[in-house]
Amino acid sequence: MEKKKRALPQTHTNVVPMKMDATFFFEKAVQSMDRYHYDKALKYFRRAAEYEPENAVNHCNLAGLLSEMGNYEESNRILQHVLDQIDPAMTECYFYMANNFANMENYESAEKAIVHYLENDPTGQFLEESEEMMELLSFELERPAKLSTIKSREGLFEHDRARALLEEGKFSEAVRILENIVKKHSDFMAARNNLALAYYYMGHFDKSVDMIKQVLELEPGNLHALCNLAIFYQHFGDKVALGELLEVLRKTYPFHQDHVFKLATTMGILSEHDKAYRLFKRLLKTGEAGLDPCLFHYTAVAAYNTGRYAEAERQWRQAEKFDPTSEIPKFYLTLLNKYKQDKIKPNVSYHYHLPFEEQFRGIERGENGLPEHLKRDPLVRSSFFWALRHGDGDTKLQVIQAFALIGDDEVKDSLTQFILEPGEDDYLKKVAIFVLRSIGVREPLQAVLEGKETTVAPSPFAPNLPVWDRKWQGIMEMAMRHMARRYDMVQQYDLQTLWVEYLTRVFPNVPKMAKPEGWAAALEYLTAKMHRRPITYGDAAARYGVSIATVSKNAKTIDEACGLREKMAAIFSKFAELDSSHES
């Protein structure tokens, strides 16, 4: 008989199977860290990363512990692996790497990493810590960090940069940045207001008004926009609209210092001098605006324009005290003293710069051209841009010459736009092209000349010459070099024009020019005569190292071809009587 199998008794156990996954090792690592068992924690973090190799957080935890243990190089190797192989968008890795580089005293690499973090991280999780690190790196590297934008503060950072550009008078560059900000952040009112100002400084009034109206549609009580609109109404002579708006502004008593300053300057520009005076005095009394010489000047102007002459003098003395190297307070103190006894006194501008005419007199008196502080002064620059768009012909010509002394990208942009304006005088545009060439613009230029759009080649504008010989260019450049510091831009341009006209008239029978110095001397002689400057054949001959006979012969050859003597005689009645007694 078969034996019955006895059933085995069922056994009950309290052992629970362990689930060995990344979470398990992560928790074990954290427990080990809490007990300061870093070696164990490191082992567990490595296991967690092995279990979930595509989980970037596990790798970052491992990198963080390695950094804590002073193993910065391996930490950075893991962080770079995360960026290269797992999640390139995990921008915080750059922040961690920057910390590691800084701890290794590799400040250049730390700067590169932290800049990359700030320029690409959208959340700004470590923004405050990053800004502290930037300060440290600037100190260690003894220079400001090469940061162009902060993505998490994109609008604010770029707006600050645009405001700085406006203050430097770099209006075109500021416009490009502000237009981009407004496109991305349509509700950024400060950017819109500054964009309107930038348009206004550049003379683009329609664009400026349109932008202000957009601000007021979005925020009807915006004080900056209301102030700007009032100035525009005054510019366009809209007395009804200005009167209504002035009633509102007269009753406005702003609290914030920047609003007080904005309203004060606006009321001054609108000839509401008493209101402006009280607001400026309030700013001086509270001291919130600091000891800015501009503020003393504004208060002085408001005092002057309300008949408070003793107060005006006190405030200009303060401006002189805090800005001792500036000519501006000295100029206005002299003006105040000059007209002290006169019942009718000339108007004084609130702008903290010398009057426009005085600036040009200063340029003409100076031997080294436009001083550096004037090149950088935004109000001087804006007055130039204004005059180029809205001045008379003589003023525009003066501005174009002044631009030759500034010669920066802003000037190049402005003149490049100017030569495309159909309504501007062709002579002015040709001088502008000459200035562009003189400040280093070598590429072909688009211009509207004689009513048609044309491409102006890098060589002198000579539309009727099929070729331009290198020798001709050399003669012209030689004359320019000799004339550089003694003749202004218009006179140098007229020399170029004369040379092109002569070559055009005699082409193709251009004479041999064996002695270039003789031709260059003749060009300077004739240009000086055109502008009624004292010169003799002997003067020109000595300057270029040639004989008087050579200069005389070449000058007469050019004159006969161009009819120059007859043209000048028509302009200057006395020109026909040349100083032949001094020439041979």
Image: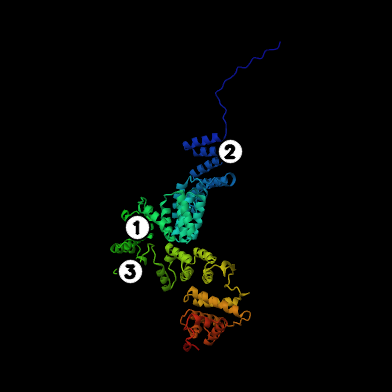
Q: Could you tell me the amino acid type at mark 1?
A: Ala
Identified at 53% across, 41% down, the residue is 62
The residue where tag 2 is placed is 52
Which numbered circle lies on residue 176? none
Dot 3: element: helix
Q: Mark 3, mark 1: which one is toward the viewer?
A: 1
Q: Mark 1, mark 2: which one is toward the viewer?
A: 1
How packed is label 2: few (under 14 Cα within 10 Å), some, or many (20 or more)? Answer: some
Q: Earlier in the sequence, mark 1 or mark 2?
A: 2
The residue where tag 1 is placed is 276
Q: Mark 2, mark 3: which one is toward the viewer?
A: 3
The residue where tag 3 is placed is 334
Distance between the Cα atoms at labels 3 and 1?
23 Å
Distance between the Cα atoms at labels 2 and 3?
80 Å
Q: Could you tell me the amino acid type at mark 3?
A: Thr
Pick the residue in front: 553 or 82: 553
Dot 2: element: loop
Q: Position of residue 314 (x, y in %)?
A: 29, 63
Q: Quadrant of residue 246?
A: bottom left
Up the image or down, 34 lies above or below 395; here it is above
Q: Could you tell me the amino acid type at mark 2?
A: Glu
The N terminus sits in image quarter: top right
Pick the residue in front: 137 or 10: 137
Identified at 51% across, 38% down, the residue is 41
Q: Earlier in the sequence, mark 3 or mark 1?
A: 1
Up the image or down, 288 lies above or below 53; here it is below
Q: Position of residue 468 (x, y in %)?
A: 61, 75
Pick the residue in front: 302 or 507: 302
